[in-house]
């Protein structure tokens, strides 16, 4: 009690020192509080947008040279992301993994959209099982025109609201439900593949950005054809008798005035496969049940489940399968935008660390000066019978009081700054920031945990910076009391 | 008289040297004396004679280079820092030349301070302790100043506070290093009278250092030092022992 009283009194006795340190701590805590809140808000928004709308919490992708994103961006330069060969094994494993709420298979790639021979747009398309997709991302997708296709409907596309507007503008007429458009894509093995699809509906992604708002959903088999996985479809292609006859009789060599030998069935079957015209999946010929191709397997976790644990389990399982698949979290899956946000957080943390070191040095210096000014007082206390613990306690309490006082003012300052920001929001200056802000404006979320974190950080720094001055104080011998004030 | 058990302080052939740059200063050279319980002792001598060094050794705030220092029956060279602190806390009261009051505490708190260090309870309840502190404040005549801060008091008043603080733990021994050096002669005289009264009232042994020959006379035991050696050691009713 007396130590606390002396510590409190010393704060006011040495006003200049207290004011200097208090101001540093106050500003530090305010900057931390505001900075962390802004970054937490941005990352939280991004996380919500991606996890609930596009990537899920975790993701398994096919064996690319380097990990890829949901948009197929990869440093390996693969045109098409390979499919996950042991897809059913993953699904089986995840079905028994604790904390996993749902899984979603997905295909993805870049497609060109056209009307007849007129190209009217380009963009990302996801090949999906419509029922599972709707269920997995139920909170993020709303049909604004037309309807969701039914399971088994052939060759359909659901265009995003943004894409529909852009396509309509390019086409000079409304592109909407009931219409047909041509999709084409360049696959790894199949060359350019062209498919006609029927527009089933127009969808709105409730949370999206410029890139995400242009994604279209296509039935999985059409997407497989476009990506060159025609032999790994859910269902066999149904050809009309004319088409069947054409494929059977077609001689590729005739295109080059060089008829192929009758025995060259390989070329024929390859051609058929390339054209997506195989009458049945290739493996069935060997009596093996074909596994439909999926490039991505998204994983949604239960609320409160440990993503790092499931990620670790899944990574271990994937390594055991040894197919070269990649297992990653939503940040890696989301790509540049999320990585940038996380990088900004790292840079901010690094800056905070550097500033913290400087603050600790300044605080320590001021405290050392303060201790040297109080040598006779500390010596007197020691002479009167104060143990070293008492001196330690007194200085620690002094630092604690200062940190608490400065912390309270700093938190108040930070709170008011955040309130001002919240009132007007911070407008994204460009599309890039719009992506990072997960919207046109960043409206900071004021969180108690952010405030506590900022306070603990400053408190920790204060304690850390008082350790050396305390060590100096403990070295003061009681004999100095006899040497006068 | 068997004085063996009456000694509160005993110094035997004590040497103390300090390093001053590259030279070694001999502050004490073979100092020996005994101090009896309840005495009012003056350690006299000119500046640099070793008075403060003797008080430092008796007060357990410094250690001898050689020789034996025994305080309240304990050889100080055998005690570690913790035990020396405890011995100072419970056995020795200090009155400093520059008062050394804690500026952020008021007079009552300053006096009570030693009793509040490290949860010492003095073997009395809080109310008894407060009563004892009030009695000390009254004894030094500062009842009307007890809520003031040291900065609001005169030098003489501050030294009265220091005397009360030195007595709050009821120590058998109080050390005063030139207690009147920073006071005018009238105030200094009143301070010495107060110390003498406390010596009689509580039976506490007072050892004070001074270079003022005029105030030595108040002591009933005078130890005079010169160049780190005892040149006179006498009780007022005895001839010089050295």
Image (spheres, coloured by chain):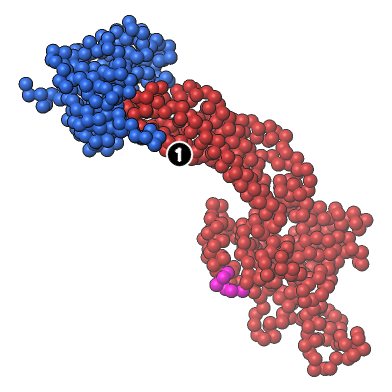
Chain colours: A red, B blue
Q: Residue at x 64, y 40 (%)?
A: A35
**Residue B96 versus residue A97: which sits nearer the camera?**
B96
Image spot of residue A401 (x, y percent) = 48, 30
Q: In this orientation, which residue lies closer to the viewer: A297 or B236? A: B236
Q: Is residue B13 magenta?
A: no
Residue density around tag 1, few if under 14, some if 14–19, many if 20 or more, within 10 Å: some
Which image quadrant is residue B177 in?
A: top left
Q: Left or right of A258: which side holds B133? A: left
The C terminus of chain A sits in image quarter: top left
The structure residue drawn at horizontal position 30% and vertical position 16%, both measured from the top left corner, is: B211
Write down the residue under mark 1: A467
Residue A422 at x, y percent in the picture: 68, 35
Q: Which range of residues does the magenta coloring cover?
A: A318-323
Image quadrant occupied by the N terminus of chain A: top left
The chain that hosts pointer 1 is A
The answer to whether residue B186 is above or below residue A406 is above
Left or right of A103: which side holds B40? Answer: left
Q: Is residue A197 left or right of residue A44?
A: right
Q: Nearer the viewer, residue B106 or A58?
A: B106
Q: Which is nearer the eye, A367 or B18?
A: B18
Q: Residue at x 19, y 27 (%)?
A: B32
Q: What percent of the width, then of the height, locates residue A224?
A: 74, 71
The quadrant holding residue B101 is top left
């Amino acid at each position: 009690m007396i130590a606390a009283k002396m510590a409190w009194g010393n704060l006011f006795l040495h006003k200049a020192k207290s004011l200097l340190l208090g101001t540093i701590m106050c500003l530090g805590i305010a900057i931390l509080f505001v900075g962390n809140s802004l970054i937490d808000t941005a990352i939280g928004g991004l996380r919500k947008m991606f996890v609930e709308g596009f990537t899920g919490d975790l993701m398994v992708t096919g064996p690319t040279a380097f990990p890829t994103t949901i948009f197929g961006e990869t440093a390996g330069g693969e045109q098409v992301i390979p499919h996950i060969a042991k897809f059913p094994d993953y699904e089986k494993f995840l079905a028994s993994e604790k904390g996993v709420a749902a899984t979603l298979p997905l295909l993805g790639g870049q497609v060109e959209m056209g009307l007849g021979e007129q190209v009217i747009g380009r963009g990302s398309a996801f090949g999906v099982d419509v029922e599972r997709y709707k269920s997995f991302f139920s909170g993020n997708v709303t049909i604004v025109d037309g309807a969701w296709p039914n399971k088994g409907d052939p060759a359909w596309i659901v265009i995003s609201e943004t894409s529909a507007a852009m396509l309509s503008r390019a086409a000079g007429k409304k592109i909407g439900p009931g219409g047909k458009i041509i999709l084409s894509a360049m696959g790894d093995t199949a060359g350019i593949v062209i498919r006609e699809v029927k527009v089933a509906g127009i969808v709105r992604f409730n949370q999206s950005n410029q890139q995400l708002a242009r994604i279209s959903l296509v039935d999985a088999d059409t997407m497989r054809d476009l990506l060159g996985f025609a032999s790994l479809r859910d269902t066999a292609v149904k050809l009309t008798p004319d088409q069947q006859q054409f494929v059977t009789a077609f001689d590729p060599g005739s295109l080059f005035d060089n008829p192929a030998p009758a025995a060259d069935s390989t070329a024929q079957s390859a051609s058929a496969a390339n054209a997506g015209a195989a009458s049945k999946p290739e493996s069935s010929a060997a009596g093996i049940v074909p596994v439909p191709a999926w490039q991505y397997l998204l994983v949604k976790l239960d609320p409160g489940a440990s993503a790092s644990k499931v990620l670790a389990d899944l990574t271990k399982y994937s390594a055991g399968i040894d197919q070269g698949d990649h297992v990653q979290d939503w940040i890696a899956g989301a790509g540049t935008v999320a990585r940038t946000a996380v990088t900004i957080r790292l840079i901010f943390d690094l800056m905070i660390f550097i500033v913290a070191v400087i603050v600790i040095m300044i605080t320590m210096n001021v405290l050392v000066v303060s201790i040297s000014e109080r040598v006779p007082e500390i010596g007197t206390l020691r002479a009167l019978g104060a143990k070293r613990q008492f001196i330690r306690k007194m200085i620690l309490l002094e630092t604690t009081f200062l940190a608490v006082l400065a912390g309270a003012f700093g938190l108040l300052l930070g709170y008011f700054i955040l309130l001002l920001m919240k009132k007007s929001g911070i407008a994204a200056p460009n599309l890039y920031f719009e992506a990072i802000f997960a919207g046109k404006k960043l409206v900071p979320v004021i969180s108690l945990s952010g405030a506590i974190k900022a306070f603990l950080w400053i408190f920790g720094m204060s304690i850390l910076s008082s350790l050396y001055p305390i060590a100096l104080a403990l070295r003061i011998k009681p004999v100095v009391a006899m040497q006068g004030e | 008289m068997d004085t063996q058990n009456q000694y509160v302080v005993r110094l035997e052939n004590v040497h103390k040297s300090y390093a001053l740059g590259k030279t070694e200063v001999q502050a004490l050279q073979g100092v020996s004396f005994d101090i009896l319980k309840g005495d009012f002792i003056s350690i006299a001598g000119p500046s640099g004679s070793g008075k403060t060094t003797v008080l430092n050794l008796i007060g357990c705030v410094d250690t001898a280079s050689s020789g034996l220092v025994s305080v309240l029956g304990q050889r100080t060279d055998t005690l570690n820092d913790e035990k020396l602190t405890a011995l100072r806390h419970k056995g020795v009261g200090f009155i400093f030349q520059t008062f050394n009051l804690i500026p952020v505490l008021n007079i009552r708190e300053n006096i009570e301070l030693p009793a509040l260090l490290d949860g010492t309870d003095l073997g009395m309840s809080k109310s008894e302790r407060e009563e004892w502190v009030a009695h000390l404040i009254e004894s030094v005549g500062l009842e009307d100043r007890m809520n003031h801060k040291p900065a609001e008091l005169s030098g003489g008043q501050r030294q009265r506070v220091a005397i009360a603080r030195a007595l709050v733990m009821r120590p058998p021994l109080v050390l005063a290093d030139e207690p009147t050096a920073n006071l005018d002669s009238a105030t200094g005289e009143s301070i010495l009278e107060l110390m003498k009264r406390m010596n009689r009232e509580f039976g506490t042994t007072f050892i004070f250092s001074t270079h003022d020959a005029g105030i030595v006379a108040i002591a009933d035991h005078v130890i005079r030092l010169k160049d780190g050696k005892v040149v006179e050691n006498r009780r007022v009713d005895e001839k010089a022992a050295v």
